[in-house]
């Protein structure tokens, strides 16, 4: 209302243009910015994940709840890795529209996937940094931090947590 | 103090059980971090402030669990689990629990 009274001495056309710009231009600009920067962040992140995952090729990270019998270990500890991620504004709006009709929300899938892989990587990195040789009994947990509203506003954070038991082999070639 | 999320400490034998030990912490988000996270929320990706906040809180919950286990005379906690629940808008409880035991 304050804006309107301040602008009352402007002619009608200018006011309507301004109104149109505020109502549609700004969200549209935000959507486009979100789309471009968001996809760029996602691509960069996936590239970094693939690169780091290839570095850990051959490092045993398993979800067995008991150790294989041939593992002789000298030391163990618990390691964890976590990450909080959120979807960009553009994809949230798309997901909001899509959820009206139901079905697969494709925009959420890569987000959760990269978060999960990142959490696993952070766990692996922390185990390796502390000098452990393998991780077993790996568990993954997902928790939602806050709601995203249907219109795409609101913080929509999802936390991924990966944790497991890291072990040191008594001798590196203890496997028969 | 040894900690593990398996049912025993690898390579050790459990000689005594003390029961379930728990540790929790309730944290609200920091206003400065929240503004940053709100901005970051537009373009998506990792919310670093929140990642760190949750990591710190989880460490604290684990620390409290360990203290409880120590006061019982245990030297290890096995089968550790984590739980997160959002209590209200902007606050979350981080909870860690496990079984306090004595290992050889």
Image (spheres, rainbow, N blue to C red):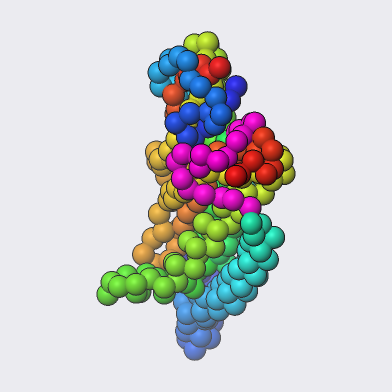
Please count the marks in the image. 0
Q: Where residue B54 appears, x then y in whole percent?
A: 55, 42
Q: Write the residue at 46% across / 39% down.
A: A66
Residue A106 seen in the figure: yes
Q: Which residues are magenta?
A: A59-77
Q: Where residue B47 appears, x then y in whole percent?
A: 59, 54
Q: Where residue A78 appears, x then y in whole percent?
A: 57, 36
Task: Determine if the magenta segment contains residue A69.
Answer: yes
Residue A139 seen in the figure: no
Q: Write the residue at 55% across / 41% down.
A: A70
Q: Write the residue at 56% across / 17% down.
A: B104
Q: Where residue B50 appears, x then y in whole percent?
A: 57, 47
Residue furthest front in the image: A176
Give the overall secondary structure of the magenta segment: loop
Horizontal relation, residue A145 to residue A37: left or right: left
Q: Could you tell me which quadrant the N terminus of chain B lies in?
A: top right
């Amino acid at each position: 209302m304050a804006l309107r009274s301040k602008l009352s001495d402007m002619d009608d056309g200018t006011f309507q243009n301004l109104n149109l710009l505020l109502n549609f231009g700004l969200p549209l600009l935000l959507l486009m910015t979100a789309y471009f920067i968001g996809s760029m962040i996602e691509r960069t992140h996936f590239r970094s994940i693939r690169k780091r995952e290839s570095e850990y090729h051959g490092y045993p990270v398993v979800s067995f709840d008991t150790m294989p019998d041939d593992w002789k270990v000298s030391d163990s500890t618990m390691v964890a890795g976590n990450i909080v991620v959120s979807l960009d504004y553009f994809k949230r709006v798309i997901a909001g529209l899509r959820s009206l009709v139901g079905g697969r929300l494709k925009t959420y899938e890569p987000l959760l996937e990269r978060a999960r892989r990142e959490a696993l990587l952070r766990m692996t990195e922390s185990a390796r940094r502390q000098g452990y040789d393998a991780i077993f009994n790996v568990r993954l947990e997902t928790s939602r931090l806050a709601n995203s509203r249907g219109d795409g506003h609101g913080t929509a954070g999802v936390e991924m947590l990966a944790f497991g038991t890291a072990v040191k082999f008594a001798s590196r070639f203890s496997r028969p | 103090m040894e900690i593990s999320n398996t049912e025993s400490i690898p390579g050790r034998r459990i000689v005594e059980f003390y029961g379930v030990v728990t540790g929790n912490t309730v944290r609200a988000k920091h206003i400065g971090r929240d503004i940053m996270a709100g901005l970051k929320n537009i373009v998506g990706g990792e919310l670093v402030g929140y990642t760190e906040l949750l990591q710190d809180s989880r460490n604290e919950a684990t620390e409290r669990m360990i203290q409880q286990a120590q006061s019982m005379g245990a030297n290890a906690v096995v089968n550790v689990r984590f739980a997160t629940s959002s209590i209200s808008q902007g606050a979350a409880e981080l909870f860690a629990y496990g079984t306090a035991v004595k290992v050889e």
